[in-house]
Image: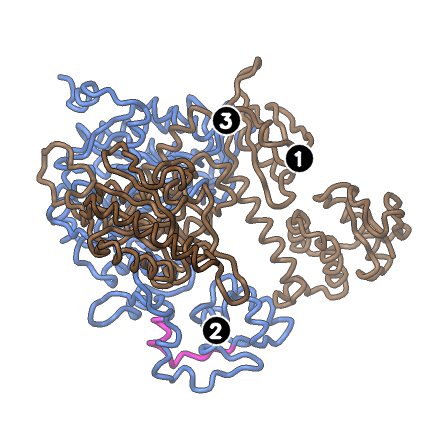
Chain colours: A brown, B blue
């Protein structure tokens, strides 16, 4: 067993020098252990530091195809630990069989090609998504960026930035390494944290965000194309990305408004605001826009977005927590077991559900797999907050006189703060728009009570709450 | 006399941000955002910033899936023309704004230094006269290059009626020049852009081609001769605003490529605009149709199809490419006698006609088959999906028995029907 310790994760020269000696000595790929200096806790730790390479021979000169060197220089930047040994195995094969690099159907070559491709993509992304912020210091303006690459590509990219921004002073900070350019030479420093990357704001970012929003054409919404090129993992370091949910959510309504606008005769004052005059159209546009909502991660696993339903001029609005298993499949609120209980209670309280608008605080189902079953999980504060945007707009369109919050999540979504049901139950809270809010329990709470007597008691209380609200209509 | 657009700007003091939003909003109907294919250069040894290294870089993507590579804005969205499809036409109600040349230069450099963009794509509504407008645009490019030694990418939208001397200056500073032919047919242009003249547009394109070729010729003789628009010229056609079918569009594009040596023809699905004109269809933009046209463009540029080959893939009744399958598959289904193709023996041209085999995959096949007889598994490793290719290929262990003759082959290969909205 030969052990080779390279100096850095992207140490191509070290790898090449060692691989050359090994291959000349005819060492089998299985007999080489490649490692990096900080990997001291492995089984062979005791041997670390002492590379036992075969002796260098005078005839160590041999040539490999240019294509191999290019490929190796890219693939070695990948974070996969096996890259060194894979490349060594390929080198042995290239040496034994000169046509290896052309045989693109070879699985080993294919695997290394895939590593190199990932690295090339990562390189492309650092060049694209680094965002500098200007910082003033005694010598003038310095530009600082924080970036989190997936692979060990920073050093290999320093030259690109030096060529492009030769006359600027700049730093690119990453968790593993930092690179500084003073207008003349490149310097390397240790890894950094986001906090060290200088100010939180650069006034030019406001202009850039304005540009980003304005260049987007809402009639051509194609979020999947955007996500494949600009995956979410990059968003937190892109000043423009926080605009995306809003732009996506508003796109269909904006497009609908453009189509609905009657062809304008010239020279009239500004066109009417995009809010459609008739609330039915506004509601439909809102619902359609919500279907593409990606404001929180719940959209990924849920079957569909479940929007509210009922007359858009209903005087009474019920707000539940979020769709359950059956609602998620049916695409309608309150149709599962809790929905049946809700319907029964409404009937007992003398309220006609078809005259009320029924919706949820959160519009996507949240669950965990338990074997074959999707077990409901309550939404967290962040998800409620993200989805409040939709609820607020539903409320603005329907403008109900009375709102009933079913459960604490609904209360939180409407009031914007945590509520204790016991403390606010049975009394009206007057909202800013003049409507009245009543808070009671969620019907699923009744389903979960194990004791039958207690359940009947609570159910009666629930019906009482509803009856009280019904009497206000 | 004070020009009218000055009065308009003075009456309402707009902030830089407001102007930027108005003038970017007005520019977004131009599809091109390419920043590739120009000379290699960088900022070492210079006074400014900027580099171009062959490949363009997309610095961001908008939720419409389009790449943002350049700062794409208009100098002004005031315009003396009244083209129906255009948001900036004289009779439109949009808010007007105007940048000075210095403001555009500042914005470009501020964005470039923060690594937001590869450069500038500047276009403009026509104010006062074509020459006046063109002068302003050339001044932006000149100032970037000469005052600031900017070495990033510049694309100027030129105005066909402008003085040829201005056009020449534009080409000295810019990497790419373009003029939009706007509509595929003369009839469409007459109806929707009454003040534009197809003949003048094409003669301007012809002049640019000559300038470019003379520039290249001069550089062969004298290394120091100035470069003229090294990234060439491109154009754009609006799809779905007039009645032209895909066959007409493809034929037109092909003749433009040939006559003017264009680098690219862009297609822009006509998209509803705020304050629309009564002449135009108000509906969702035909994005899928635009996509199929781009695929047909690829077939002609990289796959060796002639315009008439692509036209043969259109539906004889409507003259349009099928929307449910791509044009290469459509061509193959109409030319089944050409298939199956032997992956171990067929020449490159034939492999390129196999639906599902791209240029890269074909090159990999050609390199690999010198070393082994390819089996279906090998082909699968060289391509993204072997399922679509199978009916058209013969491999060492595979022969598609009767597949190519099946009447339901199209149904087997077409993607399952889904709502158009998902594509959008």
Q: Quadrant of residue B308?
A: bottom left
Residue A296: x %, y % from top left: 43, 46
Which of disc 1 and disc 3 is earlier in sequence? 1
How crowded is the residue under tag 3: few (<14 C-alpha within 10 Å), some, or many (20+)? few
Quarter of the image with the C terminus of chain A is top left
Is B333 magenta? The answer is: yes
Q: How far is disc 3 from disc 1 in space, using C-alphas? A: 21 Å
Q: Which residue is mark 2?
A: B387
Name the residue beneath numbered marker 3: A200
Identify the secondary structure beneath mark 2. loop
The span shown in magenta is B330-342
Can you identify the residue that label 1 sits on?
A: A177
Q: Are marks 3 and 1 in contact (CB under 8 Å)?
A: no
Quarter holding the N terminus of chain A? bottom right
Q: Is residue A5 left or right of residue A112?
A: right
* 3 and 1 marks on the same chain: yes
Q: Quadrant of residue A33?
A: bottom right
Left or right: A372 in relation to A442? right
């Amino acid at each position: 067993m030969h052990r080779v310790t390279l100096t850095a994760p992207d140490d191509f020269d070290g790898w090449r020098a060692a691989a050359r000696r090994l291959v000349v000595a005819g060492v089998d790929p299985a007999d080489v252990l490649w490692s990096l200096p900080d990997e001291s806790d492995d089984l062979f730790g005791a041997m670390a530091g002492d590379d036992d390479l075969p002796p260098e021979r005078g005839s160590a000169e041999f040539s490999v195809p240019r294509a191999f060197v290019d490929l190796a220089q890219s693939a070695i930047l990948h974070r996969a630990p096996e890259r060194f040994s894979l490349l060594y195995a390929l080198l042995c094969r290239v040496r034994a069989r000169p046509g290896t690099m052309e045989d693109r159907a070879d699985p080993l070559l294919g695997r290394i090609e895939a590593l190199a491709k990932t690295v090339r993509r990562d390189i492309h992304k650092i060049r694209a998504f680094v965002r500098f912020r200007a910082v003033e210091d005694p010598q003038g303006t310095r530009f600082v960026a924080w970036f989190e690459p997936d692979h060990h590509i920073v050093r290999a990219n320093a030259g690109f930035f030096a060529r492009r921004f030769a006359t600027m002073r700049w730093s690119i900070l990453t968790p593993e390494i930092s690179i500084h350019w003073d207008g003349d030479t490149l310097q390397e420093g240790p890894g950094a944290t986001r906090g060290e990357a200088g100010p939180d704001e650069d006034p030019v970012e406001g202009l850039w965000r304005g540009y980003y929003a304005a260049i987007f054409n809402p009639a051509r919404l194609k979020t999947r194309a955007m996500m494949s090129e600009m995956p979410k993992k990059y968003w937190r370091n892109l000043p423009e990305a926080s605009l995306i949910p809003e732009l996506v959510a508003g796109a269909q309504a904006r497009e609908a408004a453009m189509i609905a606008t009657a062809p304008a005769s010239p020279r009239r004052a500004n066109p009417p605001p995009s809010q459609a005059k008739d609330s039915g159209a506004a509601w439909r546009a809102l619902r359609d826009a919500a279907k593409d909502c990606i404001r929180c991660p719940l959209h990924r696993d849920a079957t569909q977005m479940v929007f509210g339903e009922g007359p858009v001029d209903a005087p009474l609005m019920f707000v539940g927590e979020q769709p359950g298993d059956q609602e998620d499949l049916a695409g309608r609120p309150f149709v599962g077991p809790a929905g049946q209980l809700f319907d029964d209670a409404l009937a007992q309280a003398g309220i006609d559900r078809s005259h009320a608008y029924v919706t949820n605080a959160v519009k996507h189902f949240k669950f965990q797999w338990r074997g074959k079953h999707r077990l409901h999980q309550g939404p967290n504060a962040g998800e409620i907050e993200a989805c409040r945007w939709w609820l607020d707009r539903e409320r603005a369109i329907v403008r109900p006189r009375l709102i009933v919050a079913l459960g604490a999540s609904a209360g939180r979504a409407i009031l914007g703060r945590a509520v204790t049901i016991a403390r606010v139950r049975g009394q009206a809270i007057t909202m800013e728009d003049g409507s009245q809010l009543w808070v009671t329990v969620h019907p699923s709470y009744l389903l979960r009570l194990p004791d039958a007597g207690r359940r009947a008691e609570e159910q009666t209380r629930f019906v009482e709450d509803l009856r009280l609200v019904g009497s206000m209509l | 006399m004070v020009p009218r657009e000055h009065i308009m700007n003075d009456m309402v003091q707009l902030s830089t941000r407001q102007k930027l939003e108005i003038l970017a909003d007005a520019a977004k109907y131009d599809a091109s955002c390419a920043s590739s294919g120009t000379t290699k250069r960088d900022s070492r040894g210079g006074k400014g910033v900027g580099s171009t290294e062959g490949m363009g870089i997309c610095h961001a993507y908008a939720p419409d899936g389009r790449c943002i590579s350049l700062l794409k804005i208009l100098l002004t969205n005031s315009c003396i023309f009244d083209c129906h499809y255009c948001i900036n036409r004289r009779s439109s109600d949009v808010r007007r704004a105007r940048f000075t040349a210095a403001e555009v230069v500042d914005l470009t450099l501020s964005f470039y230094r923060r690594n937001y963009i590869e450069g500038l794509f500047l276009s403009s509504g026509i104010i006062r006269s074509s020459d006046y407008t063109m002068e302003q645009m050339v001044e932006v490019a000149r100032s970037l290059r000469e005052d600031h030694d900017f070495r990033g990418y510049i694309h100027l939208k030129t105005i066909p009626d402008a003085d040829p001397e201005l056009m020449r200056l534009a080409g000295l500073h810019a990497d790419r020049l373009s003029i939009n032919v706007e509509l595929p047919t003369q009839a469409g242009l007459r109806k929707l852009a009454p003040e534009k003249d197809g003949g003048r547009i094409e003669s301007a394109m012809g002049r640019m081609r000559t300038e470019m070729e003379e520039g290249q010729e001069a550089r062969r003789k004298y290394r120091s001769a100035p470069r003229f628009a090294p990234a060439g010229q491109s154009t754009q056609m609006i799809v779905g605003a007039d009645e032209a079918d895909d066959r007409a569009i493809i034929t037109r594009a092909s003749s433009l490529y040939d006559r003017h040596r264009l680098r690219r023809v862009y297609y822009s699905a006509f998209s509803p605009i705020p304050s629309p004109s009564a002449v135009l269809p108000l509906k969702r933009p035909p994005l899928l149709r635009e996509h199929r046209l781009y695929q047909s463009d690829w077939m002609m540029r990289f796959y060796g199809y002639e315009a008439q080959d692509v036209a043969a893939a259109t539906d004889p009744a409507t003259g349009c490419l099928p929307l449910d399958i791509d044009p290469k598959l459509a061509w193959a289904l109409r030319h089944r006698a050409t298939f199956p193709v032997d992956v171990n023996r067929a020449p490159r041209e034939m492999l390129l006609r196999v639906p599902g085999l791209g240029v890269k995959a074909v090159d990999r096949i050609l390199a690999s088959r010198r070393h082994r007889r390819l089996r279906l598994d090998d082909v699968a490793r060289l391509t993204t999906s072997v399922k679509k290719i199978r009916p058209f290929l013969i491999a060492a262990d595979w022969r598609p028995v009767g597949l190519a003759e099946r009447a339901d082959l199209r149904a087997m290969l077409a993607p399952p029907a889904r709502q158009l909205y998902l594509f959008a």
